[in-house]
Amino acid sequence: MQNCSMIESARRVWQPVTSLLPHQIEAVTKLLPSRVGGLFMEMGTGKSRTAIELARLRQHKIDRVIWFCPVSLKTTVEYEIRKHTDCADQEIYVFDHKTHEDTVPMDRFWYVVGIESLSLGSRVFFSVAQLFDERTMVIVDESTYIKGHWAKRTKRVTQMSEKARYRLILTGTPITQGIVDLYAQMRFLSPKILGYHSFHSFARNHLVYSTRNKGQIVRTLDREWIIERIRPYVYQVTKAECLTLPDKSHIDHYCSLSSEQKTAYEAAKQDFVDDLLRYDDDRYMSNGIAIFRLFSRLQSIACGIKDGELIDNHRLSLLDDTVSAVRDSHVVIWAKYRKNIQQIVERLQADGFSAVGYDGRVPERQRKGLLDGWRRSGGFLVASLGLGSHGLDLTAASTVIFYSRGFKYSENIQAEDRCHRNGQQRPVTYINLWADCGIEDRIWKALGKKEGALDRLRDDIDKVKKSGKDKLRAYIMGL
């Protein structure tokens, strides 16, 4: 690395090609004096551009930036670097399935690494570990990916990054399940922030666990103290506070269940009730897995999928009617299930539309070209909520169709904000397709209250359980 550093010290000074917005200048001003920090900036407010500026201003002190992000965002991060800087191809290296210790070029400024890869064997870990030294800046994008203090990737990223002079985390949702999510993210930046070198010490002082359900946190102690400890090291802003964006509007379209769906839907509920009778209900439902399986099964049936296979449904016809009224050149369609994505693409193409699918079946190396082609030529981008809802810039579209929604509020709002973000010039219309059934009604109501549907449903069931099995069976059969 010594010879490498000598070469890198002579590297040209790259420049930005886009300007900062006022809130981004404010963020840079706050975090630049510190070696560690967090950009808790809501989706669409320009976290990436702000991180790039911090790297630019530190060029004389660093030789490289290692940018960890979800695998699905690697092409997006590369796109953002190219969009906002004059950096050439030879200054950016994106880790892929061919990357090994002896194939990593040592003279790049930007290294983009899929963070999940650190959990899969040692190939990526040893390949990227050799790049760390005191002249390294490391960024963890979507830092809730390292919120689990026990996770292998969290331990590996934290261990490697201790050598780096500068450490930065980016996320719009630093807390997804509770204040406990902050521990590992702050530990990555520095154990000095919270003052604890182990999760055990943090938990002993701040977390109260359930005596009934192992591992369940029922209360947080000294929450305000924790917030005050991290405040000097983070910059937080929402879209409403810093951006004037075009309006959003939501339209709901409904269809009935087909006869085949109704039969499958009722059978799924009855199977669950039969299991309640067969087993002790507290033991059967205590870990929530049974409930999750029931809800997932009901929603997949509502989307026209039973036991992994497509069945007759009216939802696709509802999509046909919806699409026929759309006049935009670029449209995004979100779907939860891969089977639906394939089905939608085939249906649209058969009707003479340009349509491409964007889910886990698209190889990483092809994702950037696929998105660039859609941005350039238009048509329908049919994307997976799981893969596409983080980080993508889809502002080319101002019409968004949700073929199905996910259980998580954060996942749904992430998907919405791919189009409603900085760079969008037109009002965005969201068209939601729903099947007329209990599970979809519960999802609609929960999202309307900005709640996760699964959590809301679990809370409702916990309340009903207290009234006895008969009430619980009636609730399930009424879904």
Image (cartoon, helix red, strand yellow):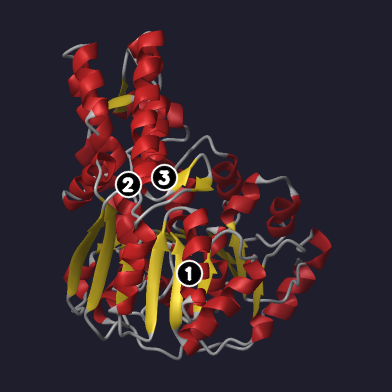
- Name the quarter where the N terminus is drawn: bottom right
Q: Can you give x and y, in whole percent of width and height, for residue 6 in the image?
A: 73, 77
| Kind of residue at disc 2 | Ile
Q: Badge 1 is on which residue? A: 347
62 lies above or below 14: above
At label 1, counting other C-alpha atoms closer than 10 Å, the crowd grade (few under 14, some 14-19, many 20 or more) is some
The structure residue drawn at horizontal position 53% and vertical position 69%, both measured from the top left corner, is 346
Q: Quadrant of residue 62?
A: bottom right
In the displayed structure image, the side of residue 428 where residue 266 appears, left or right: right
Q: CA distance from mark 3 to mark 1?
A: 19 Å
Distance, label 1 to label 2, CA atoms, is: 39 Å
Tell me which residue sits at (74%, 71%) in the image: 106
Q: What residue would you read off at disc 3?
A: 300
Q: Nearer the viewer, mark 3 or mark 1?
A: 1
Q: In the shown orientation, is residue 435 left or right of residue 311?
A: left
Which disc number belongs to residue 175?
A: 2
Q: Is residue 305 above or below residue 206?
A: below
The reply to whether callout 3 and callout 1 are in contact (CB within 8 Å) is no
